[in-house]
Amino acid sequence: MFCRKQNGGAEAPGFPGDTKKYAYKEGMRPLKGAVCLLFADSGGKYMELNDFFAAHPEVAVAFSGGVDSAYLLYAAKRAAKRMKAYYACSAFQPQFELEDAKRLAAELDVQMQIIPLDVLADAQVTANPKNRCYYCKKRIFGTITAQARHDGFTVLLDGTNASDDAGDRPGMKALEELSVLSPLRLCGLTKAQIRALSKEAGLFTWDKPAYACLATRIPAGQPITAEALRRTEAAESYLFSLGFTDFRVRTVGNTAKLQLRAEQLPLLLAHREKIVKKLGSDYSSVCLDLEVRQ
């Protein structure tokens, strides 16, 4: 296995490849960004995303509508010979993620297939163990893989980046078991770099707040139900409508716990009564987490 040293000397997994110089597709402009170091007998050489797609010219892209997979989709559209996007539509994704995915696919003129997926039919997922993300990713990416293979693709990509901590993400184990490649991570692109590159590319997702799936709002060990996901999405949609960004509404029993950034506390105070009344229709109480989001 090829590896590259990241900040602090930690090793990150790389992907197999030879030492030849891959030719860019005719008429293709090089993509800007961090590079992936491949160790060869004669010393290291650097590979950009262009080189990755030269080595993997036909790819399926698991597209969530978020910052990372949006830039990956942009890169694949420009550099791959053939590509297609797949969006897994489940109760774990809020409606706005699907709308953002549709919008970007249209703007990039990318074919995107929406795959309906009933994650709540999987008892291992709804039981919500600490490694729930492993079972969820295995189901989602297993389904996408099957469809991609049916469409003639043998390589599936996802938007995991170099800032993601593999030790804290059981879902990444599922990706490894399914042989899903993460070119942004492999090429050392961090979240900050991806945002900067997305802005340069004119992608509207460049400043989109990070957004984990709705299931993460429910504490491990508490069963995940359609009703719990519904009220979580309703609560967060309401806060979005008031101008809040980069926040979470977490479930603690039958209480909604708000996690906000410090600079948005004045906005909370300005709308406190409205928020308590609105969320009170689904929760017995509403509280604020004094450990603000960083």
Image (spheres, rainbow, N blue to C red):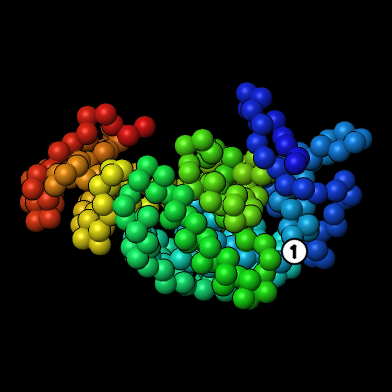
- Vertical relation: 100 (above or below) 294: below
Q: Position of residue 11 (x, y in %)?
A: 66, 31
**Location of residue 282 by image quarter:** bottom left
The image shows a total of numbered marks equal to 1
Residue visible at 37% across and 55% down in the picture? 125
- The kind of residue on which mark 1 rests is Pro
For the question of whether residue 114 can be seen, the reply is yes
- Vertical relation: 79 (above or below) 211: below
Q: Position of residue 35 (x, y in %)?
A: 72, 42
Residue visible at 59% across and 62% down in the picture? 61
Check disc 1 and report the residue beneath it. 57
* Figure quadrant of the C terminus: top left
Tell which residue pokes out farthest to the right in this image. 42
Tell which residue pokes out farthest to the front in this image. 123
Q: Position of residue 110 (x, y in %)?
A: 58, 71
Q: Position of residue 204 (x, y in %)?
A: 48, 57
* Figure quadrant of the N terminus: top right
- Left or right, 82 with respect to 224, comes to right
- Observer-nearest residue: 240 or 256? 256
